[in-house]
Image (cartoon, rainbow, N blue to C red):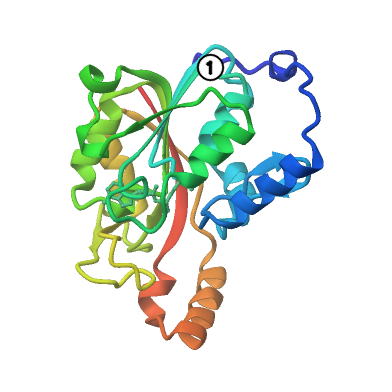
């Protein structure tokens, strides 16, 4: 893979900005607290957005290249934009954050967090409201690195979505997703017509690792690496017991699910 690996700390160093006043920081804190966040984003000066997502741990798991100097990055389903801002911090020349559901089509959140974080971080990340199924080289161009994190299992048409996403990927596609049907070797996918996955009616599919891999290949990305695999059965059994007792989730179905990260390249 042709992505640069060397450190880009020099490029990341930003010119020193004047310290915000105490009143400005208080105003920023008030704005932060008025928003329902998903991501935990460090806005500086001790202000961290209070999202429930374990964002820092997920960043480690997705194994985003340390140096993105000069590369273009597309973050699909960006929501509050943590991964877009991180790509910019790692030196990306251009970052486009896209979303539709949470940015105004009746999703769980809003675009307010993204806009506030972009302003607070003085970021140049671009934004576009577009559904993943509308992505094409004609609409958005192509990108060196594409992030498709936490979105695949929300897709009613997962293979079609991966085809659209692959069509705008020049080099590396990072897919982070719920996986289900663990234990089946052949490509298989759970279908969630209701709220079977974590009581969430917006989740539609849980592919197993073989299904994710073969869908990515079918979509035109032949080289697929698992960079974060499913946790061991003992861990998943303990997790399924906990969720059974705490939320009443079905034991066997929960034990067969986890999250995984795939890197796909041409
Ligand atoms: C769990 S969040 C993941 C956000 C971010 N990518 C991350 O990994 O933290 C799911 C994202 O998928 C988007 N999404 C959910 N359902 C969708 C749908 N049916 N169509 C398009 N986008 C959807 C949401 O707007 C949201 O940004």
- The answer to whether 62 appears left or right of 169 in the picture is right
Residue sitting at x 74%, y 18%: 13
Q: CB at mark 1 closer than 8 A to ligand 1?
A: no
For disc 1, the marked residue is 3
Residue depicted at x 62% and y 56%: 50
Vertical side of 23 occupied by 203: above or below:
below
Q: Position of residue 38 (x, y in %)?
A: 51, 54
Question: Whole-percent x and y of residue 153?
Answer: 32, 54
Q: Is residue 112 in view from this perspective?
A: yes
Q: Residues within 10 Å of mark 1 (few under 14, many from 20)?
A: some
The quarter of the image holding the C terminus is: top left
Residue drawn at point x = 33 percent, y = 55 percent: 107
* Circle 1 SS class: loop
Q: Nearer the viewer, residue 117 or 213?
A: 117
Say if 35 sits above or below 223 in the image: below
- Left or right of 194? Residue 27 is right
């Amino acid at each position: 893979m042709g992505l640069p690996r060397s450190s880009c700390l020099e490029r990341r160093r930003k010119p020193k900005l004047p310290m915000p006043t105490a009143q400005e920081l208080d105003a920023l804190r008030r704005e932060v607290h008025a928003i329902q966040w998903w991501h935990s984003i460090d806005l500086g000066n001790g202000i961290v957005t209070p999202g429930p997502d374990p964002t820092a741990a997920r960043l480690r798991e997705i194994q985003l290249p340390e140096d993105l100097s000069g590369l273009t990055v597309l973050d699909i389903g960006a929501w509050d934009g943590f991964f877009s801002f991180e790509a910019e911090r790692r030196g990306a020349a251009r970052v486009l954050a896209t979303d539709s559901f949470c940015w105004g089509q009746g999703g769980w959140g809003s675009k307010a967090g993204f806009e506030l974080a972009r302003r607070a971080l003085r970021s140049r990340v671009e934004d576009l409201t577009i559904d993943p199924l509308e992505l094409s080289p004609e609409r958005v161009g192509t990108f060196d690195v594409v992030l498709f994190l936490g979105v695949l299992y929300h897709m009613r048409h997962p293979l079609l979505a991966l085809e659209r996403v692959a069509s705008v990927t020049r080099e590396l596609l990072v897919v982070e997703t719920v996986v289900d049907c663990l234990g089946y070797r052949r490509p298989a996918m759970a279908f969630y017509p209701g709220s079977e996955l974590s009581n969430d009616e917006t989740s539609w599919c849980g592919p197993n690792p073989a299904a994710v891999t073969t869908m990515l290949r079918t979509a035109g990305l032949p080289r697929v690496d698992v960079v974060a695999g499913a946790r061991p059965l003992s861990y998943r059994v303990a997790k399924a017991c906990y969720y059974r007792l705490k939320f009443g989730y079905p034991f066997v179905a929960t034990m067969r699910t986890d999250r995984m990260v795939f890197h796909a390249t041409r």
